[in-house]
């Protein structure tokens, strides 16, 4: 498939038969990207967290790290701009963003509504944490930065360079595993939580490949995170607490995900599996030229 990152400034190309040379050419690109992103993660939190708190600091740090690492890498290696590598904005990008938000938010809603209907959980008011609309809007805004930042880090220039050199599978799976590993430091994380995070990583990477752009995975990522906030559920170990209620579970951690949140639940495992079909179907309906086997094709 052709699209942003493929039709923009040409990424350094090597003979398709020379895999060793491809890997050697890829290594410095990945090393520089990781070094820049790592430096941002070391330097920024200690300056932001005392002022803004852990959630805001995490979101802004990952956004800054992703933006800086991608901008510098694209400029130094390709003499290009970010819009050529998955961030170009047009009507199709907007459509893919909203498709992603709808799918991510819909998945969170489906889990919660099913759990309520099955009496696995009930809602309880939090009198000491009343709903606060300005705070809800602010947190939603922060979640946009967090989702965009993580997608730039995990499916931006480094992912795209690895994909070009080694193929879709060799890029999606390792990056998804790394995506899960970096969440191991989150509070109250569980084994199932990491497994689900890896599955999310596969889904998000595949969403990039499906549309050749970052807007669908950004939308999916943000929609899911927004849904967990709206439905009063912990987000990757963070308790947000701005909606005035929380979901109280009548079942164990296998259902609820424990203090890590729904991402540690087997219900999320099922939801992510269903999202592969839902996302493919939604993109096929909205952008048939982007789906392999449809008009436009590969």
Image (cartoon, rainbow, N blue to C red):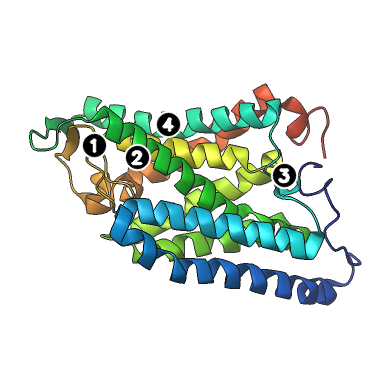
Considering only order in the chain, which callout, 2 or 1, is on the residue closer to the N terminus? 2
- Front of the two marks 2 and 4: 2
Q: Image quadrant for the N terminus?
A: top right
Q: Which residue is mark 3?
A: 83
Tell whether label 2 touches label 1 (CB within 8 Å). Answer: yes
Q: CA distance from mark 3 to mark 4?
A: 26 Å
Considering only order in the chain, which callout, 4 or 2, is on the residue closer to the N terminus? 4
Considering only order in the chain, which callout, 1 or 3, is on the residue closer to the N terminus? 3
- Front of the two marks 3 and 4: 3
Element at label 4 = helix
| Location of residue 231 by image quarter | top left
Which residue is painted at 71% across and 56% down in the image?
Answer: 160
Which residue is painted at 83% across and 31% down in the image?
Answer: 296
- Whether residue 265 is situated above or below residue 19 in the rendered picture: above
Q: Which residue is mark 1?
A: 242
Q: Which residue is mark 4?
A: 105
| Location of residue 106 by image quarter | top left
């Amino acid at each position: 498939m052709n699209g942003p990152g493929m039709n923009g400034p040409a990424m350094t190309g090597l003979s398709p038969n020379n895999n060793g040379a491809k890997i050697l050419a890829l290594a410095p690109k990945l090393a520089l990207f990781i070094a820049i992103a790592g430096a941002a993660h070391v330097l920024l939190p200690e300056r932001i967290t005392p002022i803004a708190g852990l959630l805001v600091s995490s979101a802004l740090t990952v956004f800054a790290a992703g933006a800086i690492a991608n901008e510098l890498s694209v400029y130094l290696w390709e003499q290009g701009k970010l819009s050529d590598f998955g961030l170009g904005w047009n009507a199709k990008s907007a459509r893919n963003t909203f498709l992603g938000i709808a799918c991510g938010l819909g998945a969170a809603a489906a889990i919660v509504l099913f759990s309520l209907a099955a009496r696995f959980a009930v809602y309880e008011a939090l009198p000491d944490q009343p709903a606060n609309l300005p705070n809800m809007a602010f947190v939603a805004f922060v979640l946009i930065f967090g989702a965009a930042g993580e997608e730039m880090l995990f499916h931006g220039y480094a992912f795209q360079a690895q994909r070009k050199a080694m193929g879709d599978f060799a890029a999606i799976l390792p990056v998804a595993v790394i995506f899960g590993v970096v969440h191991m430091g989150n509070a109250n994380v569980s084994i199932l939580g990491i497994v689900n995070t890896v599955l999310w990583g596969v889904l998000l990477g595949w969403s990039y490949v499906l549309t050749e752009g970052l807007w669908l995975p950004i939308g999916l990522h943000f929609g899911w995170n927004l849904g967990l906030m709206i439905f009063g559920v912990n987000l990757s170990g963070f308790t947000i607490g701005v909606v005035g209620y929380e979901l109280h579970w009548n079942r164990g951690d296998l259902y609820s995900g424990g203090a890590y949140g729904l991402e540690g639940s087997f219900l999320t495992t099922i939801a992510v599996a269903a999202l592969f079909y839902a996302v493919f179907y939604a993109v096929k309906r909205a952008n048939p030229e982007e789906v392999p086997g449809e008009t436009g094709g590969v």
